[in-house]
Amino acid sequence: MLELLLIIVALAGLVWVMRREAGALPALGVLAVLGLIGVVFGAVTAGILLWLGAAAVAACGLPTLRRRWLTPRLFAAFDKAAPKVSETERTALEAGSVAWDGELFSGRPQWQRLLDFRNAGLSEEERAFVDHQCSVAAGMCNAWEIARERADLPPELWEYLKREGFFGMIIPKRYGGLEFSAKAQSAVLQKLAVNETLMVTVGVPNSLGPGELLLKYGTEEQKNHYLPRLADGREIPCFGLTGPRAGSDATSLPDVGIVCRGQHNGQEVLGLKLTFEKRWITLAPIATVVGLAFRMFDPDGLLGDTSDLGITCALIPRDTPGMDIGRRHHPIGSPFMNGPIRGKDVFIPLEWIIGGPDMAGQGWRMLVECLSVGRCITLPSGASGIGRYAVGWAGGFTRIRRQFNLPVADMEGVQEPLARIAAHAYIAQAAVMQTANTIDHGVKPAVPSAILKSQLTEFQRSMLADAMDVHGGRTVTLGPRNYLGIAYSANPVSITVEGANIMTRNLMIFGQGAIRCHPYVLDELAAKDDNDLAAFDKAIFGHAGMVFGNAARAFTQGLGIGKSRVPFDEVAAPYAQEVSRLASAFGLCADAAMASLGSGLKKREMLSARLGDVLSNLYLASMLIKQWHESESVEHEAALMHYSCRTLLYRAEQAFMELFDNLPNRALAMTLSAVALPLGRRWHKPQDRFTRDIARAISTDSALRHKLTADTWNTQEAGQRDNPLARYNALLADSERAEPLYRRIAKAYSQGELPAEALHPEQRVEAAWEAGLIEEDDAIFMRRFEREVLDMLSVDDFAFDAFATDKDRVVWHTT
Ligand SMILES: Cc1cc2nc3c(=O)[nH]c(=O)nc-3n(C[C@H](O)[C@H](O)[C@H](O)COP(=O)(O)OP(=O)(O)OC[C@H]3O[C@@H](n4cnc5c(N)ncnc54)[C@H](O)[C@@H]3O)c2cc1C
C-alpha cells in the first residue's frame, strides 16, 4: 500500500514541478526524499525505483552532469535535423518583434503582460479628425458613381484628401504630416471603409511604400525633399515589387539595376541602369514618384568586389526618361488606381536608392521590417470597418424588410448570418484596435500582422457574403442605391494583396511563429550556427522544461485540475483560462510536430496551417478578452462575447482535431491527443439562444448596435451623398412605435376587419385609420414610415442599352 502511495505522490510531485517548469533540482528532491521514505519505512522496491528515477533526472537534468555526455550528442542530432534557414527566411524571421504571440507560444501566457499595453484611446486631435474629416470624405462617396461612372474618386474628394493630410497620417508633424498613432490610422481607415476605393486610396500611401521606407531608412536629404510633399499630396507614391514572374515569391523578382556610369543633369555620374516590368501596382497610374524593388548587380566592380548586391529599393520620379507608366488594370469591383510600370535601361543616380548607396542590397530587409506594421493596419482595418457597416446595413435592412407579416430579422434562418456578422465584426474590432495599441507601445508585430491580415480578410469575406444573403435581391441589383454589392465584388483584392491568404495561412503564420515567437528555437538555431555548446545546452534544456511543462499543464487543466489564475471578470475569466489551457496544448503540439517532422514540416503546409489556425484563434480570443476587460459593456454584449469566444475556441479545438487526424506519426498523434485534450473537445458552436439575442440587438435601436457601428459615417449632412446607414438608424429608432401598429393592422386584416383588396401596407394603414383602429397621429407616422421603408427597399433600373460600352453592338431584340 505504501509502495503505491509513494509512486502516486511521486507522480503528483513531478507533475507539480513540471507545471511550474521548476527545473531538475526540485524533481530530484521529490524523488530522492520519497525514495528515502520508502527505504526507511519498508517500501524498499518503490524506494529504489524512486532513487533510480532520481539518478536519471540528475544525469539528464543537472547541467554539470548532462553537459559531459548528453548535450554533445543532442547537438550533433540537432545539427542534422534542424531546417536550413535561407537568407531570405532569416531576414523575415528577424524582422519585427514578439509580444503576446510569444506568450501564447510559451504555453504559459502571462495575462498581465497583455494588460500592461494600456489603451489610452485617441488624442483629441485624432478624435476630431475621425469625427469630422472622415465624415466629410465619406460623405462625398457613392459606390456606383465611383466604380461605374467615373472609375475614380471625384476630383473634389482627391482635393479634400490631399488638403486635409489623409496621405500623411504616418508622416511626422515636423515634415508636415499628421503623425497619427496606429490606433488613429486604423480608426480613419475603418470609417473610410464605407467605400473600398476610398479606403484603399488612403490606406496604401500610409502603409508599406515610399513614405514608410523613407521615414525609416531615407537619407536626410530624401526625407526633407519627399516627406513634406507626400504629406500634402503634391507627390503621390506607389511601390512596385510584384511582376509577372514574381508574385508571392517576391524575392525571385527578375528586375535588374546594373551599376554603370551615365548622364544625370548634364553630368556623368555613377548610377544604375534599370530594366523592369511590374504589374498590379496600386496608385501607379497617377503616381508622381515610384518606389521600385530590383536586384542590383555591379558586374564591372565599380562599387567594390561584390557583383550581386541583392534586392534594392529606389525612388524614381515619374518623368524619368524610359519609364512607361500610366496604363490601368481593372481590379475586380473597385476602380482604385492600379496599373503596370515598365522600364528599359532607365538610368538613375545611386543617390536615388532609398537610404543612399549604403543601403544597396538591403531592400528585402527594409520591406519585411516595414510590412510588420503596415500589414497590421491597412487591410485589417478595412475588414473591421466593413464589419461595422455590414452590421449597420444588414441589421437595418432585415428589420424593415417584412415577409410573411414579419421582419425577416425575426426569422431564425436570418438570425444565424446576422449573429455571425456581428461576431466577426466584434472580434475584428478588438483584434485590430488592440494590435494597433501594441504598435503604439513600440511593438512591431510580425506574426500578428500575418494573423490579422489573413484572418480578418477572411472574416470580411464571410461578413460581406452574409450581408449579401440577408439582403436578398436588394443588393444583388447594382446601381447608385446599392451600398453593398460593389464592396462584395471587390473582396478578393483584400484576400490577395499583402501576402495572399492561402500562403499566409499555410506557410507564414506557423512557419514564422515557430521560430520567431518560440522562446527557444531561435536561440537553438543561433547556437548551432555559432557552434556554441553552452548556449545550446541552455536553450535545449530550457526547451525540454517547456515541453514537459506544457504537457503537464495541458493534461491537468484538460482534466479540470489547477486552472490558471486570470485577472478577468466572470464572463471573460473562463475563456481566458481556456486560452491558457489551449496555449499549453498548442506549445506541446507545436514542439511535437517540429520534432517529428523536422524540416519536412515546411512542406506539410496543411499541418502548418492547422497549427497556425490554433495560434490565430487563441490570439484573436486574447484580443477580445482584453477589449472586454477594458471597455464598459452594454446590454446584450455578454451574449456576443460568449458567442464570439465560443466560436474562436471551437475553431481552435477543431484545428487540433484535424492536426491529430493527420499527423503522419500515428502513435505520436494519439499520445498528443490523450495528453493535450484528455477529455476530447470541449467547445461547440455557440448556442442558438445567443444567436437570437445578438440578431435582435443588432437589428433594433440597441446599445449593442450603436457600439458595433460606432465611428462609422452615420450622419446625413446637407450636400452629402445619400447615407443608407443614417437612414436605417432613423428607421430603427421609429420601428418600436411601428411594430405594434403593424401587428394590430395585420391582425385586423386577417380577421376580415379591413377590406380584402387592401393589399399594400399603405392601403391597410388608410383602411385601419378609417376603421378607427389606429389614431390619426399613428396614421401620419405610419404613412411617413412606410414611404421611407419603400424607398429603402427600392432598387435602380436603367435604359436598355445603359451597360453596353459599345452602343453600336447593342441588339434591341424587340425592334
Ligand atoms: C489589386 C492588386 C493590388 C496590388 N498592389 C500591389 C502594389 O501596390 N505593389 C506590389 O508590389 N504588388 C501589388 N500587388 C501584388 C500582390 O501583392 C500579389 O498579387 C500577391 O503578393 C500574390 O501574388 P500573385 O497574385 O502573383 O499570386 P501567386 O504568387 O501566383 O499565387 C497564386 C496562389 O498560390 C498561393 N501560393 C503561392 N505560394 C504559396 C506557398 N508557398 N504556399 C501556399 N500557397 C502559396 C497564393 O496564396 C495564391 O493563392 C497587388 C495585387 C493586386 C491584385
Image: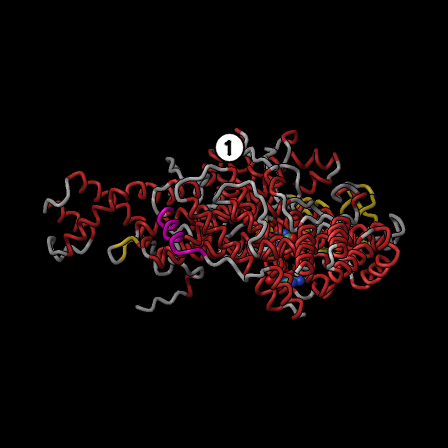
- Residue at 80% across / 60% down in the picture? 78
The C terminus, quarter of image: bottom left
* Residue 566 in magenta stretch: no
Q: Is residue 513 visible?
A: no
- Residue at 53% across / 41% down in the picture? 568
The total of numbered circles placed on residues is 1
Q: Which of 57 and 536 is in front in this view?
A: 57
Instruction: Identify the residue position indicated by label 1 in the image.
Output: 127
* Residue 690 in magenta stretch: yes
Q: How far from the left and from the top, in percent, is residue 322?
A: 70, 51
Mark 1 C-beta closer than 8 Å to ligand 1: no
Crowding near the residue tagged with mark 1, few <14, some 14–19, many ≥20 C-alpha atoms within 10 Å: some
Q: Specify the principal SS of the magenta part.
A: helix
Seen in the picture, residue 124 relative to 252 is either above or below; the reply is above
Instruction: Provide the secondary structure element on which disc 1 rests.
Output: helix
Q: Which colour scheme is used?
A: secondary structure
259 left or right of 614 in image: right
622 left or right of 748 in image: right
Residue type at mark 1: give it.
Arg
Q: How far from the left and from the top, in percent, is residue 633?
A: 44, 39
Q: How far from the left and from the top, in percent, is residue 757?
A: 13, 57
The N terminus, quarter of image: bottom right
Picture quarter with ligand 1: bottom right
- Residue at 24% across / 42% down in the picture? 784
379 left or right of 309 in image: left
Q: In which quarter of the image is residue 591?
A: bottom right
Q: Is residue 449 visible?
A: yes
Q: Which of 13 and 702 is in front in this view?
A: 13
Seen in the picture, residue 706 relative to 755 is either above or below; the reply is above
Q: How far from the left and from the top, in percent, is residue 3?
A: 69, 60
Where are the magenta residues, as a range? Answer: 686-697
